[in-house]
Amino acid sequence: MKQLILAILLIIVNCGRLTADIYVESLCPYCMMFIKDSLLTAITTPDIEQMVHIRLIPYGNTKRKIVDGKWVFTCQHGEVECYGDLIELCAQDSIVKALGTVAAEIPKAGVVHCIEDFIQKPYTNNSFVEAAQHCQQYYPYEANEVINCASSAYGELLHLIAADETDNLVPKHKGVPWAVANKQYTEETGDEIINNLLRWACNNYDGEKIAACYTQQE
Ligand SMILES: *[C@@H]1O[C@H](CO)[C@@H](O)[C@H](O)[C@H]1NC(C)=O
C-alpha cells in the first residue's frame, strides 16, 4: 500500500515537470562553459528536480558509420572526445544502476560536471580515466567498472543509444551545446537553458516554485 501511494505521488509530482535535454560533447569549449556555469548552478539548487528533469547526452556532432561490419565513430574534437563521451555515458549508467532512474537524475548530471571540471589540457584518454577515478569519491560507482565499460560492447551500445537520440532530433541540432525544452526545440528556450537553466525553470514551471526561484538568479 505504501509503495502504491508512493508510486501515485511520483506520477503526480512528475506530471507537470519540465524537461531539459542538453546535447553536449566531452571536449567542446562551449559545453564546458555551460556545464561549469548554468548547469552547475541548477544542479546545486536544492529541489530543482521538482521542477525540471535535466538530462545530458554526450554525443553532439559525432558522426558514425559502419566499416567492415563495425561501427566507427568520428568525434568533432578527435578520438579523445569519443573516449570522454564513453566515460561519461558509462558513469551515468553506473549511477542509474546504483540509485535507480529517479534518484540518479541530478547525480548523473553532477558526474558529468565533475569529469569536465577535472580534466586539464592536453586532453588524452588518460585525462578521462583519471577523472573517472577522481569523481568516484563523490558518486556511487566503481571507477574500474566505468573504465571497463568505456571500451566494451556495452559502452558501444550506450554510445549508439546517445547517437540515435541525437541524430533523430527534429529539427536537427545545429551545434553544441544544444538544449531542448519539453521535447520541442525552439531557439529561444534553447538559448535560455544554455544561459541560465535555473532561471528558465523558475520562469516556466507552472507548479509551486522552489525557494530558490524567490531569491537571486543572476
Ligand atoms: C582513446 O579512446 C578512443 C575511443 O574509445 C579509441 O578509439 C582510441 O584508440 C584511444 N586512444 C588511445 C591512445 O588509447
Image (cartoon, rainbow, N blue to C red):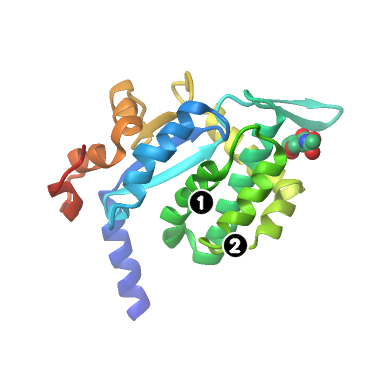
| CA separation in Å, label 2 and label 1 | 10 Å
In this view, 186 is above or below 24: above
Task: Report x, y in % for residue 19.
Answer: 35, 42
The residue at which mark 1 appears reads as: 111
Specify the quadrant of the image occupied by residue 5.
bottom left
The residue at which mark 2 appears reads as: 141
Q: Nearer the viewer, residue 15 or 29?
A: 29
**For the view shown, which residue lies furthest in the bottom direction?**
1
* Picture residue at 47% right of the left edge, 22% below the top: 173
Q: Quadrant of the N terminus?
A: bottom left
In this view, 66 is above or below 13: above
At mark 2, the secondary structure is loop
Image quarter for ligand 1 equals: top right
Task: Report x, y in % for residue 175.
Answer: 48, 21
In this view, 154 is above or below 26: below
Task: Report x, y in % for residue 131.
Answer: 61, 49
